[in-house]
Amino acid sequence: MGVVPGYAYVLVVAAMVVSAVVMIMVGRRKRAREGTYNAEALSFVGGVLNALFIVVLAFYTVITWTEADASERHAEAEASSLVEIYWQVASSPGPERDQIRALVKEYTSEVADREWVMLHDKKADQKADDVLVALRAEITRLPAETDRELATKDQVLQNARAVADERRSRIEQATGDSSLLTILLWGTIIGGILMVAFPLVIGFSADLRHVLSIVGLAGVLAFTLYFAIELDQPFQGLIKAEPVSFRTALAEFNRIP
């Protein structure tokens, strides 16, 4: 997990300050001081807004968290299949084995060092794709004259297909745009604003307790909104996924005979 950036603190403090200023100004009105409003009706409306905000935020959080977790699982499965390929060609003829292992290393390094950064901008690395294509082509050239060689070739090809499938899923997670998530995000933002604006509109007084309660609510909601936006960016930001699986695979390659 990364460090909370400065603008997040600015967002929270700004929300609290603005809420305090508006609360004090609005709370000085006669209507707010005398409490000339239907408390039961407004309480009902406020309860509905609160429930809707919680529901939308819950859906958004669950979906984004699930997708971020899926991205990491795809990366782990992809790296695991690469390690399996490296192991499985150990008994293959020297030239073929060395070429396949070199391509496996090159692909893993390309993903960890270059493509992962490109995923921040929702882009895939064409070179990594080309190396993967070359790897699968090289695997098809493995000898299959004996039953053992045929079984090894089938296993290696199966893991190569798994790498391609997991990579495709990982890239789709990183580069795809979900209209549902966009709607839920805007619903969360608008709901957070309404949660603070509603008490100000109905006319809370400028009593210190009321001001502090609204200021605290604004601060919590501002940080909640910031965290919600961060969840939708699994390859950048505060809780971004790291290419740990691929770097671990690179280290494991060096220990395989």
Image (cartoon, rainbow, N blue to C red):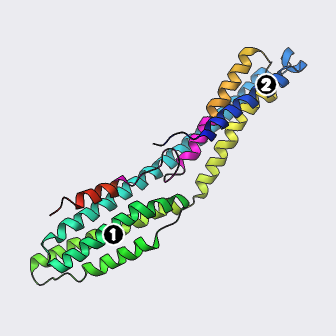
Q: Is residue 241 left or right of residue 26?
A: left
How crowded pointer 1 is (Cα within 10 Å; few <14, some 14-19, many 20+) is rated as some
Instruction: Specify which label sits upstream in the sequence, 2 or 1.
Output: 2
Q: How many marks?
A: 2
In the rendered image, the vertical position of residue 96 relative to residue 123, given as above or below: below
Q: Is residue 58 left or right of residue 197?
A: left
Where disc 1 sits, the SS reads: helix
Q: Quadrant of residue 210?
A: top right
In the rendered image, the vertical position of residue 15 relative to residue 182, given as above or below: above
Where disc 2 sits, the SS reads: helix
Residue 108 placement (x, y as % from top left): 34, 64
Q: Quadrant of the N terminus?
A: top left
Pick whichever, 155 or 249, lies toward us: 249
Residue 20 placement (x, y as % from top left): 75, 25
Q: Is residue 116 left or right of residue 255?
A: right
Q: Quadrant of the C terminus?
A: bottom left
Q: On the image, numbered disc 1 is attached to which residue?
A: 106
The answer to whether any part of residue 48 appears in the image is: no
Residue type at numbered disc 2: Met
Pick whichever, 130 or 197, lies toward us: 130
Pick whichever, 114 or 58, lies toward us: 114
Q: On the image, numbered disc 2 is attached to which residue?
A: 23
The label number, if any, that marks residue 81 in the structure image? none
The answer to whether any part of residue 31 appears in the image is: yes
Residue type at numbered disc 1: Glu
Query: CA gap, disc 2 to disc 1?
Result: 60 Å
Residue shown at 66% from the left, 27% from the top: 217
Residue 49 placement (x, y as % from top left): 69, 34
Residue shown at 30% from the left, 77% from the top: 136
Segment tinted magenta in the rendering: 222-244
Residue 36 magenta: no
